[in-house]
Structure formats: C-alpha cells, structure tokens
Amino acid sequence: MSEIKSYIKNLLVRRQIIVAEDRRKLFEDFVANETNCTAVQQILDIQKMLMDKWELQNRIADIQQQPVSIPNGTVGKRYEAILDFKKLGWDDIAQYELAGLELPGLDFIKETNTITGTPAQSGDLKITFRFRLSDEPEDTPLKEKQISLIINPDPKTLWKNIDSDRTDPFWKEDNIAAFDKLGDKHIVVASKRGRSHATVGSFRDDDFAYKYYEATGWSIVVVADGAGSAKLSRQGSKIACKAIVDFFTENFNQESLVEFDQTLLHYKKGTGEGILKKLSHFTYNHLSKAAYSAHLKLAEAATETGANLKDFHSTLIFTLFKKYEFGYALLSFGVGDCPIAVLDKGLSEVTLMNWLDVGDFGGGTRFITMPEIFKDDKFSTRFKFKLMDDFAYLVLMTDGIYDPKFVVEANLEKIEKWKEFMNDLQGNNENNDKVELDAGNKDIASQLSTWMDFWSAGNHDDRTLAIVF
Amino acid sequence: MRRLPVYLLLDTSGSMNGEPIEAVKNGVQVMISSLRQDPQAIETAFISVITFGSTATQLIPLTDLASFQMVDLTAGGTTSLGAALSMVANKIDSEVAKTTNDQKGDWKPLVFIMTDGIPTDNWQQGLDEFKKRKTAYTVACAAGNGADTKILKQITDNVVSLDTANSQGISKFFAWVTASIGVTSTRIEDSGKEVKGLDELPPPPSELNIVV
C-alpha cells in the first residue's frame, strides 16, 4: 500500500469512518486523485519537517545537558585535556568553537581539540562551547554549552610568611642556623619556623642548644620541640634546652667523672665485673637529674608567669659525647617523638640513641613537662650509653624533619634510609640544595638552612636538624 | 602523606526536591572552592559524597580537593539513612589507610550528615555498623523540623539543627562545615592532634542550633 493511501485510510479510521464495500471504487479513485495526492504529500512533508526539527532540537538539548568533565588543573603545572568528540558521541557536530578560555597560559588547539598550556592563574572557569549540528543549515546561529574548568592555585603560593611578633615577651627568631667546633668534632644546626606557623605569623616552637665543656672535654647537643597546642611551648623548648646545658656546666666536673672514666676503661678492656651496669647507672644518675632539672625549671617558669605547666609542653632529646683515647662515649636521653641517631664511619650501621613516644596507644607523644614520665616504669629506658671507635655523624632532629624524611619509626633503623637522607643532604633532591658537610665550608650553616626549606605536602611543622661530624 | 578523609552524607529524598537540593549542591561547591584556597586543607583533605534517597550511593569516592568535581544531585524517593551509614562504614574500611610499620595511616575521618526527614529504612542496623568504625568526629544536621534530632543524637553527640531547610540555612551549614574542616586540617598539621568534638570546632553560626 502506498504511503498516501495508508495516510488517507488512517485519517478515515481516526474519524471513525468505515468505507463500505460498495464505496471501494470511490475510495480507490479518491486516493488516486492527483490533487488529493499532492495534498497528502504536502502534509507528510510538513510532518517530516516537524519531526526532523524536533529531533534536532532534542539532540541539541541532549548535548547541552550532557555532563562533560575535564580534569582540574593547577597553576604552574602543565595541563592538557582533550575534548574527545568520538567518546562524547559528537560525530554530528559540524562546526564549533571554544570561548571564555580567558585564563593566562591556556590555549585551545582546534586541530586536536585540546586545551593545553601551563595555567598562570587559578579560578573556576565557565568555558562556552559553541556548536552547530551537521543537520542544521550553515547559517544557523551556534548553540552554546557550558563546560567547567577548575584551575587550582599552586599550594606553595597559598602559604604566607608573616613575621612573628617581636614585642612578645617570649619572642624568638623565626629561623636560626649555626656552625661551631665541638671538641674535635663540628656541629651544624638549623631551626626553622614551619610554614603552618609562618602563614599565621605565630612563633617557632622548636629550639636547640649545644656546648663544649672545655674543663672535661665533653660536648652536648640538645634539641626540643614545643607542643603546637601549648601556648607557651616556644619558651618551654628554650628553657628545657638551656636547663640541660646549664646542668652539665654545673654538675659535670673532673671529680664526678673520675669513676666514669675508670669504669669506661674497664669496659673497653673487658675487665672488672658488672661494668655495663655501672655505666648504665652512671648514665641514668646524671642524665635523669639533668632531665629533672629541666622539668623543674619549666615548673618554675610556669609559676613565675602564672601559666600552667602544660602550657610549656615540650619534647626533649640530648646527647653528651666525649672523645677518649680508645673511642667516643655517647650518652643520651629522650622524651617525645624526636630521634637521635649515630652513623658509623663506613655508613654501614645506624645506632638509635632513644626510642620515640609515638602511636595511638599510650596517648601519643610525651613531654618533659609531664611529671608522670619520671615515675613511669619506662623512665629508665629513656637513657642510653654507647661506646664507638668513631662516628661519621651524630644526628638529632625534630619531627618536622623526621616525618617527611623517614615517615615511620621503622625506617629509622634502616641504614639505607640514612644513606638516602645523607644523599639528600648532599644535593640529591628536587631543588638540588646541597649541604657540604665540611668544616672548611664557610656557608655550611646557611646551606643547611636553605636545604631545610624542602617542600613536602602535608609536612609544614617547625624543623630542627643538628648534625655533629 | 596522611590524608584527612571527609565523608559527606547527604539526604536526597523526595522532600529535598527543589530549593533544598540546589542549596546542598551549591553548598558543596562553595565549600570545595573555598577549601582550595586553604593551604593546609588543599594538601590534606580528601572528600567523598554519599547520597541517600531510596538507596545509598557513593556519588564521589574519596577524592583530593584539587581533582574534586561536583556532580549533579537529584532528589527523589525515601530516606535510607541506615544504608548510608552502612555504606560509609564500608568505605572507611576500604578507603582510609591504616597505620602499619611501613606507612603512616590516614587521619581519622570526619563525617558530616545532613537530613531533612526521618529514616525510612532499618537505620539501627546501619548505625551498629557505623559505630564500629573510628571517626575523629561526626556531625549531624537536622534540616527543618521534619528531621528527628533524637535519632541523630543516637548517631553522634554533635547534632545541629536548622529551623527551615532553605537555601540560606543550608549554605550557612556548609560554610560552617568548611570552617570545621579548615580548623581540623590546621590542627593536625600544627600539633599532630585530632579534633574530637563540637567544642573544639569554630562556633556554629546563629542559624544553626546546637541540639543538647
């Protein structure tokens, strides 16, 4: 049946008209009539035109509503996003352009349908994609579709560097570095305010101190990290460091050391009984008194200022060392989460001089300000004695260095990690910042300070690193 | 790096249709753009969106702020809060890294729930699952008087309410969520300590009533 005939037939059916048997001939003639045929053809053409138009508009609406996601970019980072017409099902787009890509550094390359470049500015951009479908006449105005493009700021530029308040009674320098002789060894040390403090103009909470005691030949290095949540911790770390140095100035003299020197000689020779126990006792006796003197100084400071002792919360680590004819004696104490490590001359072995108060169990870190640490069963394990022929490096650091460089405690025991760390210091890093650990290097302190600006996402605490070599 | 996971549990039941759902979508978008300007948050915060209507769906898996892209939200169906709680429990298991000897795990997740109605599913079962997981804190927001703060109180101590679920109130809620995430990411960065409850967060705006 022809299209025209079936159209007329359906028309009659829709009007509930039944063509009777005896009108069959009349119907056939009606259908064959040229004028009628033309009329039906016109109707069909118009219907088709309407249908096409509807489909076209529907298709345009589909494209306009189709979610098109292109990856977010970051200022300063190479960006490339392809509008893949095939994947998007846009084969029927005959003409298109991209408008609104008005962000410095980005361009649209039409040949490859690629948005590319290195964005120089952040922002939430609405890009307008203008298009015409192949079924639309060429002079049809282009239809519009919005595409979002998010350019993130460079995280590094979000940090501000606001000077801390110099008029504050407990002000301390934001950044400090030093180089010195410690007996026959040398120390390079730097302490830097973390970005998290710099961005709000708050103080550096870390501190350090060191001293060579000429009368006895002993040297000491102390590092302390004031708790971020304690409001006077910057002063706490400072008082703790000073208290330790002062304690040994007053209490470490020839008389008190005679017995230790003799015991050490026995230890070296392997003579005498219970020698190691004696050495441990000596270490415990002297260092625990020193640690407790720091605690008392902090308690005094709290009373004087009318603040709570916990406002001065600070971790504390220190190592005493002295060169004897037969090697180096090292004595350490530690409370908190800052490691002390000694590397031997051949960099074949690392000795940890303390354990870290870390982890969810046990309530996290501990501070020298906490009276309970002195009563704790574990108190006696906070001390360590070690005798070595010589050492390459004695390293003390706060968690601002330890977290980004060692991540977990287990890594501190691995000599490979320490080799990596020393390589990093020697310039094997993103910025090629190098610390030449040579006593003749005049720039050594500033080199260490620069090296300590390394970038590590999520690690913006104060950083203190002391290296004895 | 230790991530700070943030789960948003958003009610997309039929009653949220219209102004509320648009306000929620807008609220999340504004929140993301503003957190992107926060140096601590952009490095540590990871966001996931779980919606609940007749079922619960993780619309966006845990995603860093820099790559996060908000998707369309449509409202319809019932209020499967229980399914959403089960889902977030599962996602915490699969998406949040635990601390081992070789890696530092993520920070404990933050969970923000917003609902305008009473759960229509077996919410107690979902809650039992959820309670077995550790979060730094969970905040539930009852949007409008159709929500039951007594049920939300069983999910968490930290419950706030909005008198009406209109765009102004909802945007204030998200502004406060934004500030809370900001404070939490700063706190962990600064002191390595997690924020545990409402009293350590910025004070909520006047539109938000603290439910005691």
Image (cartoon, helix red, strand yellow):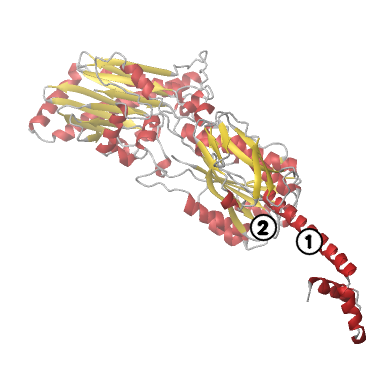
Relative to A315, B43 lies left or right: right
Q: Do the residues labelled 1 and 2 touch (CB within 8 Å)?
A: no
Q: Residue A416's spot in the image, x, y percent?
A: 26, 38
Kindly identify which residue carries mark 1: A48
As rendered, which of A379 and B49 lies closer to the eye? B49
Residue depth check, mark 1 versus mark 2: number of the one nearer the observer: 1
Residue extending farthest to the front is A34
Kindly identify which residue carries mark 2: B53
Pinpoint the chain carrying mark 1.
Answer: A
Q: What element carries label 1?
A: helix
Q: Residue A420's spot in the image, x, y percent?
A: 29, 34
Can the viewer see residue A18 in this picture? no
Within 10 Å of disc 2 (Cα), the crowding (few <14, some 14-19, many 20+) is: many
Relative to A270, A338 lies left or right: right
Within 10 Å of disc 1 (Cα), the crowding (few <14, some 14-19, many 20+) is: few
Vertical side of A237 occupied by B195: above or below: below
Q: What element carries label 2?
A: loop
Q: Callout 1, which amino acid?
A: Lys
- The alpha-carbon separation of the residues under discs 1 and 2 comes to 42 Å
Quadrant showing the C terminus of chain A: top left
Quadrant showing the N terminus of chain A: bottom right
As rendered, which of B38 and A255 lies closer to the eye? B38
Pinpoint the chain carrying mark 2.
Answer: B
Relative to A437, B92 lies left or right: right
Q: Callout 2, which amino acid?
A: Gly
Q: Residue at x 73, y 39 (%)?
A: B207
Q: Residue A288's spot in the image, x, y percent?
A: 29, 28
